[in-house]
Amino acid sequence: VYVQSFPNVDAGLVQVSVDGGATPQWSPRGDRLFFVRRQGRRGVFVVDVTTSPVFRASAPRELYGRAQLEGVELDGGWAVGPDGERLLVLARVASHGRPQLVRVENPL
């Protein structure tokens, strides 16, 4: 996962995940960036960011790891709640093969 400034795209890219990542989602306040890792250390991760005076991102920290996601195949259908404190995840439970809506409260 990389971040690039806009509209000044000449400022370059900042890498925020070191072991891959997919489907990044910004928090509503723009102070966190969430993403999923599907390989290796699989899970949902978050980095805290600041944008002033320059862009900086913390090291990624795991919100949900392999143990919490056992039997769940993340399909990329997810979003950060409007308050930035909840995640809405549409996941396919491998044993059932049907999408289920899972509400997770207080992940942060």
Image (tube, helix red, strand yellow):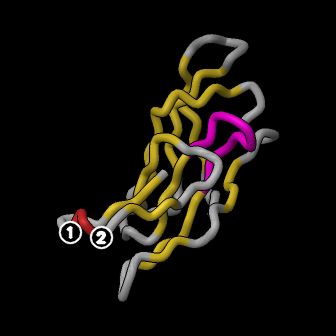
Q: Position of residue 65 (x, y in %)?
A: 74, 45
Looking at the image, which is closer to me, 63 or 84? 63
At x 58% / y 72%, what residue is drawn?
Answer: 58
Instruction: Depth check: give the residue in front, 90 or 7.
Output: 7
User: Please, what secondary structure does the residue beneath circle 2 have?
Assistant: helix
Q: Residue at x 41, y 76 (%)?
A: 55
Instruction: Name the residue beneath numbered marker 1.
Output: 8
Q: State the residue in front, 36 or 9.
A: 9
The answer to whether any part of residue 83 appears in the image is: no
Which residue: 53% across, 49% down? 35
Crowd band around label 2 with a 10 angstrom C-alpha radius: few (<14), some (14–19), many (20+)? few
Element type at marker 1? loop
Q: Quadrant of the C terminus?
A: bottom right
Rendering coords of residue 13 (x, y %): 39, 61
102 left or right of 55 in image: right
Spatial CA distance of label 2 from label 1 is: 6 Å
Q: Is residue 39 magenta?
A: yes
Query: Residue 82: x, y in percent?
Result: 38, 58
Image location of residue 7, percent across then percent down: 18, 65
Q: In the rendered structure, are the residues bearing label 2 and label 1 in contact, judged by CB atoms less than 8 Å apart? A: yes
Q: Is residue 9 left or right of residue 23?
A: left
86 inside magenta stretch: no
Query: Which residue lies under the disc numbered 2?
Result: 11
**Residue 62: which quarter of the image?**
bottom right
Q: Amino acid at mark 2?
A: Ala
Q: Is residue 41 above or below residue 80?
A: above
State which region is magenta.
36-45
Q: Is residue 48 visible?
A: yes
Tell me if mark 1 has few (under 14), some (14-19) or many (20+) residues whose alpha carbon lies within 10 angstroms of its own: few
Q: Amino acid at mark 1?
A: Asn
Front residue of this view, candidates 98 and 71: 71
| Residue closest to the far bottom | 53
